[in-house]
Amino acid sequence: MARVVVVLGAMLAACGARAQSAEKPWQYSASVSYYDLPKYQDYWNPVVTADRDRIHLEGRYNYLNIDSGSFWAGANFSAGKTWQFEATLMFGLVVGTIQGVGPGFELSLNHSWFKLTSEGEYVFETQKGVDNTSYSWTEVSGSPASWCRLGLALQLTNALVATRNVQRGPVVAFSFKNFELEADVLDPDRDDATYILSLSRSF
């Protein structure tokens, strides 16, 4: 009887270990961007994310507008092998200069050297007399080398009064291990061009 108990205990422990090892660990990312606006106030934009299987959590500051923070929760989806498509559908709370709630999304499509990403949100303002806020950022880029990306970015926003609703410009990014350094110039042909320098890490 004692042997049976020992054998059953060992089997249950093994099954538990396999189930625990099969669970995907949390994956995190952190980034900070510096926005240089020659005619207006410069600012920092930190973003942190946490993902596990379908769960997605995210916090942002100065993203939709200066002195505004947002907190997001959503679900991850993915499909494809040669062409890898990933989507995250979210719902968030925004506080600060902008106050409200609304849906958001993050999309990506990857194939060999090609990469397309897009993210956006629409916030229903809870403050009287304040218009609803929308924002989106889209990048299309290619990698001439594994450590380098070149492409174009498009920003659509009605939140930052310092800029036009539509901005576009080149993207240059360099990666090393889990780090990526990206530089963007929006509307480089104008004297009020927006310069963005971002550093991100995943772990």
Image: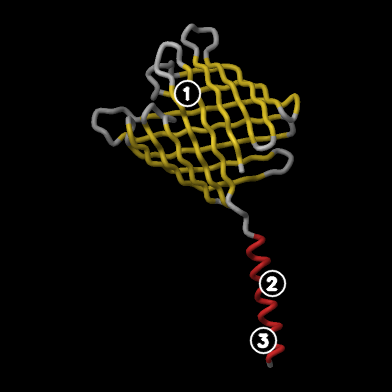
Say which residue label 1 marks.
156
Disc 2 marks which amino acid?
Ala
Distance from disc 1 to disc 2, alpha carbons, whole Å, reads 53 Å
For residue 147, above or below residue 59: above
Amino acid found under the numbered disc labelled 1: Leu
Q: Which residue is mark 2?
A: 14
Number of disc labels: 3
Question: Residue 159: which quarter of the image?
Answer: top left
Q: Secondary structure at mark 2?
A: helix
Query: At numbered mark 1, what does the secondary structure look like: helix, strand or loop?
Result: strand
Question: x, y percentage for residue 56?
Answer: 52, 47
Q: Earlier in the sequence, mark 3 or mark 1?
A: 3
Find the distance from the CA under tag 3 to the CA under tag 1.
Answer: 65 Å
Would you name the residue on which mark 3 appears?
A: 5
Q: Disc 3 vs disc 1: which is toward the camera?
A: 3
Question: Residue 137 location in percent, x, y?
Answer: 52, 27
Residue 20, percent from left and from top: 63, 63
